[in-house]
Image (tube, rainbow, N blue to C red):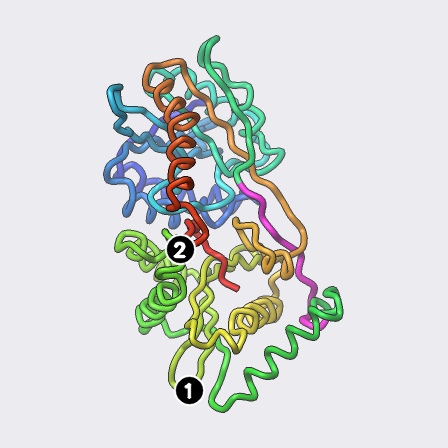
Amino acid sequence: MEVAVVRDGDGFDLLREEWDRLVAACPEASIFQTFDWQRTWWRHFGASHRLLLLLAREQQRLVAILPLYEAREAQPLAPSLRRVRPIGIGGETSPDYLGQIALPEYARAAAAAFCQQLVRDSDRWDVLELSDLREGSELLAEASRMRPSREARVVVGESARISYTDLPKTWDAYLAAMNSHARYAVRNVRRKFLAVPRTRLFVWTDRAGLDTAVDRLIQLHNMRWHGRVAHHSFSTQRYNAFHRELMHVFMEKDWLRLYCIQLGEEIIGIYYCYVFRGVLFHFQGGFDPKHENLRIGQCLMGYAVESAIGEGCTGLDMLRGEYDYKKRWAPSTRTTYSVSVTRPTLAANVDRLMRGVLVPIKSRLKRIVGRGSSRAPAAASARDQDM
């Protein structure tokens, strides 16, 4: 097995057909590992970084890809930290289910080859972070054993806990699996909303007018979260441009679902979701806060699940973010993992000192002076609670 490294955007573009074939043949490949998601992310967030695509070939056939990049992070009184991370991590985004994309019969050999390549090139990086790896993945096992030097530090931890569930063949069967109180609430909220004149629930299908829906999603999300949290999604031009382009691409592939709730002439809520390989992925949403009394989040989520079942989806994945409302809709939990390999360099030691000592002290001081009290806006993850 030969490992090659692609370090430029032109080389990235030449991989489209092979990448698509590999994803199609890899049962565990996620929507975040598709060529379109990865290439769109790199176009919007990769300008200040260096591409590091690892390709494994067996007799010239592409059998695995590990999409990474190298970032340089300035540090006070120390050399810049050279950090290797998966494409998609950083730049205001936090996708799930990353790691290598590999044909099942080559997964173990490819993971070993990739890790050996990273060890051979370890003089080029200070910290290697492989995150959002599925439990039991070959890359997780191989990376956990990496030792670029005797003094290297390897830490395995959790990336995220994700709520998910299998979907039955009918909406009624899905409701029957809920307890009686939850089942009544779902039906009652929907019934009360639709009893209001000039209301409707629908999936956005107008490709020519997609930008109108994107604009409204951004507006609704900012209306809901502005002033309530310190950081939230759809708050920067770069993040918005990335998702706008991605939604156009995904709509062409029938992977995009924008579930909308309308009152009169106005859309008052949108759920931004993906459907990939028969699974509905709940990604993000926005609601008009002045209509919270209508329970539009719950109403829209029920509609999204019912619609997904209606089109034959067999799974619901709520993605990262441990919120009670996610567990109500998808009661099972899976965990993804990370592996951090730190070399004993000056830059890495300074980074560890900053993260392990100075950052906690700074946070503690903020709490003491009141900036971290409950009266101040709390920080929110890249995907916020939307129910």
Q: Is 273 drawn above or below residue 124 in the view shown?
A: below
Is 161 colored magenta in this rendering?
yes
Label 1 or label 2, whichever lies nearer to me, is 2
Look at 55% across and 19% down and name the residue there: 145
Which image quarter: residue 189? bottom right
Alpha-carbon span between mark 1 and mark 2: 30 Å
The numbered mark, 1 or 2, whose residue comes first in the sequence reads: 2
Look at 49% across and 91% down and name the residue there: 197
Look at label 2 and name its amino acid: Val
Instruction: Identify which residue, 219 or 149, lies in the foreground.
Output: 219
Question: x%, y% of residue 321?
Answer: 53, 50
| Residue with the most extreme front position | 369
Would you name the residue on which mark 2 appears? 229
The residues colored magenta run: 160-172
Give SS at disc 1.
Answer: loop
| Residue with the most extreme top position | 150
Give SS at disc 2.
Answer: loop
Question: x%, y% of residue 88?
Answer: 39, 42
Look at label 1 and name its amino acid: Gly
Horizontal arrangement in the rendering, residue 305 relative to residue 33 (left or right): right
Dot 1 alpha-carbon crowd within 10 angstroms: few under 14, some 14 to 19, many 20 or more: few
Q: Is 150 drawn above or below residue 77 in the view shown?
A: above
Which image quarter: residue 5? top left
Instruction: Identify which residue, 270 or 313, lies in the foreground.
Output: 270
Look at 43% across and 45% down and name the residue there: 94
Q: Is 165 drawn above or below residue 271 in the view shown?
A: above
Look at 36% across and 58% down and name the residue there: 249
Is 197 colored magenta in this rendering?
no
Are circles 1 and 2 on residues that touch, CB within 8 Å? no
Horizontal arrangement in the rendering, residue 63 relative to residue 211 (left or right): right
Q: Which circle marks residue 305 in the picture?
A: none
Would you name the residue on which mark 1 appears? 264
